[in-house]
Image (spheres, rainbow, N blue to C red):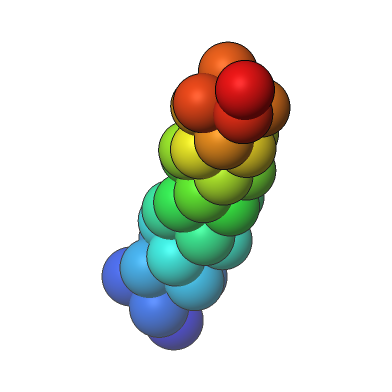
Amino acid sequence: MDEQQRQSQNLRVVKRIEFRQQRYTSRMRTAQHCSQKP
């Protein structure tokens, strides 16, 4: 049970990190779009 709990916690942290990275990359992409506009 302890191992399972640790795994679930790890998964939650990974999801949070992935979400943050996704938001960051999307923001950078939108910034590029704005800079590309004439």
Does residue 23 sit above or below 28 in this rendering?
Answer: below
Residue 28 versus residue 30 in the image, above or below: above
User: Which of the two residues, 13 or 36, is positioned nearer the viewer here?
Assistant: 36
* Residue closest to the eye, 22 or 5: 22
Q: Is 34 in front, or is 4?
A: 34
Residue 5 in view: yes
Q: Residue at x 57, y 44 (%)?
A: 26
Question: 23 or 27: nearer the eye?
Answer: 27
Which image quadrant for residue 30?
top right
Judged left or right of residue 5, residue 30 is: right
Extreme residue in the front direction: 38
Kindly identify the residue that appears in the image at 62 percent across and 22 percent down.
Answer: 38
Report x, y in % for residue 18. 46, 51
Q: Is residue 25 left or right of residue 33?
A: left
Could you tell me if residue 9 is visible in this image? no
In the figure, 34 relative to 12: above or below?
above
Q: Check the picture and name the quadrant holding the N terminus.
A: bottom left
Residue at horizontal 62 percent and vertical 29 percent from the top: 37
Number of numbered discs overlaid on the protein picture:
0
Residue 9: x and y in percent read 53, 59
Q: Quadrant of residue 10?
A: bottom left
Rendered location of residue 4, percent (x, y): 40, 78
Write the residue at 49% across / 71% down: 8
